[in-house]
Amino acid sequence: MSDTPARLLKLLSLLQTPREWPGGELAERLDVSPRTIRRDIDRLRDLGYPVEAARGSVGGYRLVAGAAMPPLLLDDEEAVAIAVGLRAGAGHAIEGVDEASVRALAKLEQVLPSRLRHRVSALQKATVPLTRGDGATIDPRTLTTLASAATGRERLRFAYRSGDGTRTKRQVEPNRLVSTGQRWYLVAYDLDREDWRTFRVDRVGEPYATGARFAPRPLPVDGTESGAENGADSGADSGRVGGTGDGGGDAAKFLARSMRRMQPELRLDVWFGAPAEFVAARLPGLLGAPEPDGEGGCRLRTSFADSLEWVALRLALVDCEFSVREPPRLVAHLEGLGARLTRAATLPPRRNATGEDSSTADPGQG
C-alpha cells in the first residue's frame, strides 16, 4: 500500500482493535516492510496517538489510553454521548445492535481517559431506560471483555450459571459474539470439556481475559449434533455441537444449529399484505427474508426454533396485514391472543372511588 494517508488510516484501524499486533503481521496486512511500519508508528505518535511497543520475540504494538483523548475528531461530550449510547444499546441485545456495535464500544472505551470513563459510568448509573429489549439485561463491560478477547484471540475465564441453576467455572477460547435480537451468545471452545459450546452472555459472570493467546480453531460445519449439557432452557444454553470442521464454519449458523437442537424446529409460512422490502426491514434477520408474491404482498417461508410467543409478537410488530398458514400451533396462539386483545379493547372502562373514568387519569398525578 503506497498511499501513505490511506495506509496510516488502515494501520490506525487495526491498532484500535484491542489486542497487541506484531510488527510482522502489520507489515503483511499492509503489504509494506517492517521498517515502513516503524516509520508509520512514529507518524501516529506525532499525531497524538499513544502507541506502545513491547520488545521481544512475542512483542508488538498496542494502542493504549493516554492522558487525553487521541485526535478522533470527537470532543469529550461527543465521546461520552457515544459511549453511553453504545452501552445502553449493547446491554439489551436490541435488534440491529450487533457485534459491530460491541466492537465499536470496546475500541472507544480502550482509549477513553479515566476522567471520561468515570463520567460515562456515572451517567449510566444515574439513568434508567424507559424502553427495553426483548432479552435479559447485560452489563456492557461483560460484552466488551468478551468481544476484546475474541478479537485478540485471548483465552477467557468466567463463572457460568446454567439453565438449571448449576454454577461452574469455565476456561474457553472465544470465537465470536452473536446477537439474536433477544439475547447475546458467546460461541467458544471449552478447554476443560474439549469441545465447542454456546453460552448465554446474561449468565456469564466475572469474565477475565487471561492474557494467554491461542491459535483459532475451525468451527464445526457438518458435525454430528449431540445433546446439550442441560435442557432446562429454551435457548442455546451451553449447548454442544460435536464434530470437526474444515474452517468454513460460521458462528451464527453454529448457534442456529445449537438452538434448533435445544427445542423442536417449526416450519413457518406467513403471507404479508405489504412489499417484501417493507416487511424485511421490520423482521429480525434470523427469521429470513420474505419473497414477493407478485401482487404487492410477500410470503415468508422459513424454520424457527424460538418460542411461539416471541414469533407472534414479532409478526404483529411488522405493522401490516398478515396471515399465518403454518404451523398450526402458532395459528392457535394468535387466535387466543387476538381474542384477548379484542376483549381488552371492548371492556368498559374501570372507575375509581370518585366515579371518574380511570382510563383518562393523568399518569403524572397520584
Image (cartoon, rainbow, N blue to C red):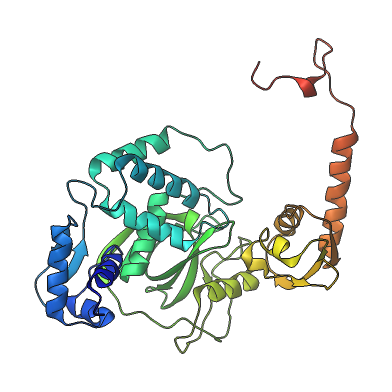
Asked whether, in this view, residue 356 is left or right of residue 90, the answer is: right
Q: Residue furthest bottom?
A: 246
Q: Residue 151, located in which quarter of the rendered image?
A: bottom left
Count numbered badges in the picture.
0
Of the pair 306 and 21, the residue shown nearer to us = 21
Q: Return the residue nearer the eye: 170 or 304.
A: 304
| Residue at position x 50%, y 35% in the image | 128
Q: Quadrant of residue 60?
A: bottom left
Give the quadrant of residue 36: bottom left
Image point (38%, 54%), residue name: 105
| Quarter occupied by the C terminus | top right
Q: Residue lying furthest top in this view?
A: 354
Relative image position of residue 71 (x, y in whole percent): 24, 52
Question: In the rendered view of the protein, which quadrant contains the N terminus?
Answer: bottom left
Horizontal and vertical percent position of residue 180: 57, 62
Residue 165 % position (x, y): 52, 55
Left or right, 279 with respect to 25, comes to: right
